[in-house]
């Protein structure tokens, strides 16, 4: 059974930084695409970033230049480094695992087969 466990969410002030982690059990992340999504109250879940098996990365325009997605295949763990945080980044953040290459479809929820329970990020002004 695949389990994805996020951690690292917190409350920070505008301009602050956080590093989210997603530990994966029961699934080897190296051959597949992994992604981060977020959902703010009253809004749809949206793609934030994804990393494919070759290490290529993709980002939502709203986070480009501020967020960095990475992974440690040896530890089977996904990361999201978030810098220059803004109040509009406030949301529940979810990691997701796809049993395939994501490519240009990285932001589509249907691509991902397993999801974590989420970790809350709150940015105050």
Image (cartoon, rainbow, N blue to C red):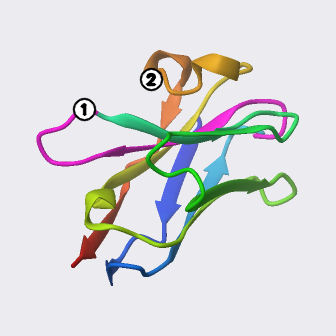
Give the total number of marks visible in the rendering: 2
Q: Residue 29 placed where, x, y %?
A: 76, 40
- 69 on left or right of 112: right
Image quadrant where residue 19 sits: bottom right
- Classify mark 1: residues with Cα within 10 Å, few (<14), some (14-19) or many (20+): few
Tag 1 near tag 2, CB within 8 Å: no
Q: Which of the two discs, 1 and 2, labels the residue nearer the N terminus?
A: 1
Residue found 84% across the figure and 31% down from its top = 31
Vertical side of 25 occupied by 12: above or below: below
Vertical side of 25 occupied by 31: above or below: above
Q: Residue 86 placed where, x, y %?
A: 34, 67
Image quadrant where residue 22 sits: bottom right
Question: On the image, numbered disc 1 is attached to which residue?
Answer: 44
State the mark number for residue 109.
Answer: 2
Please report the bounds of the magenta region as a residue range. 29-44
Residue found 59% across the figure and 35% down from its top = 1
Pick the quarter of the image with the C terminus: bottom left
Predominant secondary structure in magenta? loop
């Amino acid at each position: 059974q695949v389990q994805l466990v996020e951690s690292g969410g917190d409350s920070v002030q505008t301009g602050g930084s956080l590093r989210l982690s997603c530990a994966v059990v029961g699934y080897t992340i190296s051959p597949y695409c992994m992604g981060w999504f977020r959902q703010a109250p009253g809004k749809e879940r949206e793609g934030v970033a994804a990393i494919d098996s070759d290490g290529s990365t993709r980002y939502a325009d709203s986070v480009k230049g501020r967020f960095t997605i990475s992974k440690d295949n040896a530890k089977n763990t996904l990361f999201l480094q978030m810098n220059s945080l803004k109040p509009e980044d406030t949301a529940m953040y979810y990691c997701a695992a796809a049993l395939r290459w994501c490519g240009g479809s990285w932001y589509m929820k249907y691509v991902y087969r397993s999801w974590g329970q989420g970790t809350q990020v709150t940015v105050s002004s």
